């Protein structure tokens, strides 16, 4: 590494001169990033200029969102689906403040993201420059500090490469999350030779898959004496899910998932007891009770309010062993009898290996009762364009199964979830937005996709060939913790860009669509087959039902009637109004999924149906 200055690099190198912003994109090219999501403006112009050049090179493209929060949600969805760095950019001042909600959401949900914001030129700091956001103005570096792993001003071109690399390494650090670089206009425009980056970022980001061997030895001993172990699979199991399912199947260990991890596992897996946490299933709660489980292995979970059923005593007790790659999560589980730090994949591969080795000469100890788990057959009927529901019903119990078949008008949200589960083809990605969409989806949506174990299915094999980890391709994505309305709308666009050609279904509320729906025009522009399903109840439904459940004042939840199908058509999308179960049955799903552009289904649901949000209501009541 040399301590070269810009001027002597320019003088000594006989290479073309670009700008510093180009170097940022050359680093992103190293790690395969395809898109920068953002909104342009004066102070971020050098980055957009560099994007014009990267587009000409055939690499990174700008995706212009309509609102910066939408850009951050898109970067979030892109990262979740691709496993890559999500990148978003905005101008100084209001561009940066608009980004903030999306960045905070990614921080709470531990999504690796690079945030680049513009900044007034250095000499104008402190002079009330237009939209100034330096340390003497609306300090954006400071603003992002509370919701990023790293936030810094690049105050000199020589700082850029090491600050950039430090930022990206922090985004993929022990606790993944967003990082922020503030780039003054003159710094981003600084001449910079078009040479290969000095650091090999891909190499620096390779992480060892290590674990705490002492703790894993103890874990094995605990498992050897446990009579009724159960697993709780959390969001952090995204890459480990295949190994976890193999282990669970080999030992016939039942499991529940947190709401975010629901989409990692097939609903029909015979050991799946459903969701534990917000809008979860009684069968999952029962599986964790003392009479059912003498050992709970909680995997990759932060024990937040919604993922732990409001810190339920059924989970957070001495029967708990917490296994996680994010050490920070251990601060939430002091009661656990053991903490196992390290790669969850590596821990489970070690358990599997040790079990198989012992199986030979000590049969009956580790694999006390080797059970071949009968895997359900899930058939997609090309003629009806639906899954065969008899063959693929979930293995857990839902609260109101009858309503899933109800022919009532207005449509029951439970029926809608049932239909959505069965009408879309394998590999469809679902995103549920903040509000009742989350509650209905977590409880009733059960995407049927032929996948049971990550290692056995054709779909999985194809995805591995395509270079994607199956596990990254969750069939249902939700947002917990920060949970901003409209996350799923931008998120769905990001998912669709990360995986072109697959249908993406965004389940959202009318309130969320009124807040963020303009991002549908990005799906129009990029010809993405995103299906936006609006739960139209003419209200901020979660607020309305929350007020009713807790006996609060009934105020501020009404929304005006809006024709969302017409609104979609006005923005260039296909818009369809759905009022009855028959309307759903009449849909040409194949055409929607292969269409070069989005479709909006404006679904008039029964606004009186109470969503499964009692857990949230209890917390609100307890806080009074
Ligand atoms: C940006 C933001 N503002 C406010 C809230 C609080 N909030 C949570 S759910 C909700 C209502 C959502 O209404 P809608 O999108 O219509 O969905 P519904 O619950 O009716 O299905 C509100 C206001 C929030 N989570 N995010």
Image (tube, rainbow, N blue to C red):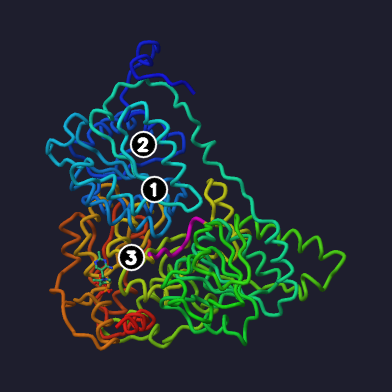
Horizontal and vertical percent position of residue 427 = 47, 59
Q: Kindly identify the residue that appears in the image at 38 percent across and 34 percent down.
A: 59
State the residue lying farthest toward the right.
Answer: 361
Magenta-drawn segment: 472-479
* Cβ at disc 3 under 8 Å from ligand 1: yes
Residue 428, by quadrant, is bottom left
In-image side of 10 versus 381 (left or right) = left
Q: Nearer the viewer, residue 479 or 170?
A: 170
In-image side of 191 versus 570 (left or right) = right
Q: Nearer the viewer, residue 121 or 475?
A: 121
Tag in front: 3 or 2: 3
Local secondary structure at mark 1? strand
Residue under label 2: 60
Against 60, residue 18 (above or below) is: above
Q: Residues within 10 Å of mark 2 (few under 14, many from 20)?
A: many
Residue under label 3: 483
Mark pair 3, 1: CA separation: 17 Å
């Amino acid at each position: 590494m040399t301590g070269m200055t810009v001027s002597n690099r320019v003088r000594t190198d006989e290479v073309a001169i670009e700008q510093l912003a180009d170097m940022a994109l050359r680093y992103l090219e190293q790690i395969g990033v395809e898109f920068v999501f953002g909104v342009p403006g004066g102070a971020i112009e050098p980055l957009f200029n560099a994007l014009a050049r990267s587009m000409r090179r055939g690499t990174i493209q700008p995706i212009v969102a309509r609102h910066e929060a939408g850009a951050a949600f898109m970067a979030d969805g892109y990262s979740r689906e691709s496993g890559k760095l999500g990148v978003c950019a905005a101008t100084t001042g209001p561009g940066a403040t608009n980004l903030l909600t999306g960045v905070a959401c990614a921080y709470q949900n531990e999504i690796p993201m690079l945030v680049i914001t513009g900044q007034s030129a250095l000499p104008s700091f402190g002079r009330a420059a237009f939209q100034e956001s330096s340390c003497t103005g609306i300090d954006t570096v400071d603003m992002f500090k509370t919701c990023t792993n790293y936030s810094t001003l690049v105050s000199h071109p020589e700082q850029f490469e090491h600050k950039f690399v430090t930022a990206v390494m922090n985004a993929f650090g022990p606790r993944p999350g967003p990082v922020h670089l503030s780039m003054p206009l003159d710094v981003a425009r600084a001449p910079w030779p078009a040479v290969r980056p000095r650091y090999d970022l891909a190499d620096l980001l390779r992480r060892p898959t290590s674990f705490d061997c002492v703790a894993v030895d103890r874990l094995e001993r605990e498992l050897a004496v446990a009579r009724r172990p159960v697993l709780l699979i959390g969001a952090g199991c995204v890459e480990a899910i295949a190994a976890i399912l193999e282990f669970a199947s080999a030992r016939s260990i039942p499991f529940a998932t947190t709401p975010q991890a629901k989409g990692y596992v097939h609903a029909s897996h015979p050991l799946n007891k459903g969701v534990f946490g917000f809008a979860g299933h009684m069968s999952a709660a029962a599986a964790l009770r003392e009479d059912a489980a003498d050992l709970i292995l909680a995997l990759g979970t932060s024990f937040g309010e919604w993922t732990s059923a409001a810190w339920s005593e059924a989970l957070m007790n001495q029967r708990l062993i917490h296994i996680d790659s994010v050490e920070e999560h251990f601060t939430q589980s002091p009661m656990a009898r053991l903490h196992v730090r390290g790669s969850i994949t590596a821990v489970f591969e070690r358990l599997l290996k040790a079990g198989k080795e012992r199986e030979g000469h000590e049969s009956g100890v580790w694999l006390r009762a080797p059970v071949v788990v009968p895997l359900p057959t899930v058939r997609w009927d090309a003629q009806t364009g639906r899954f065969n529901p008899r063959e693929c019903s979930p293995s857990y119990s839902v609260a109101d199964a009858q309503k899933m078949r109800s022919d009532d008008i207005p449509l029951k949200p439970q029926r809608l979830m049932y239909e959505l589960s069965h009408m879309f083809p394998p590999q469809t990605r679902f995103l549920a937005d903040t509000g009742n969409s989350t509650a209905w989806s977590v409880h009733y949506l059960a995407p049927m996709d032929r996948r049971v174990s990550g290692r056995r299915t054709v779909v999985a094999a194809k995805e591995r060939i395509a270079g994607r980890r199956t596990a990254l391709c969750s069939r249902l994505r939700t947002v917990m913790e920060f949970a901003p309305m409209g996350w799923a709308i931008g998120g769905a666009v990001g998912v669709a860009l990360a995986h072109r050609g697959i249908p993406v279904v965004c389940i959202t509320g009318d309130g969320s669509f009124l807040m963020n729906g303009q991002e549908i025009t990005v799906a129009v522009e990029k010809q993405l087959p995103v299906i936006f399903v609006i739960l139209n109840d003419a209200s901020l439904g979660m607020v309305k039902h929350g007020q009713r459940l807790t006996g609060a004042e009934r105020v501020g939840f009404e929304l005006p009637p809006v024709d969302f199908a017409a609104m979609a058509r006005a923005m260039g999308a296909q818009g369809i109004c759905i009022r009855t179960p028959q309307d759903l049955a009449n849909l040409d799903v194949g055409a929607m999924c292969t269409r070069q552009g989005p479709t909006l289904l404006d679904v008039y649901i029964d606004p009186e149906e109470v969503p499964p949000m009692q857990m949230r209501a209890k917390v609100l009541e307890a806080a009074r």
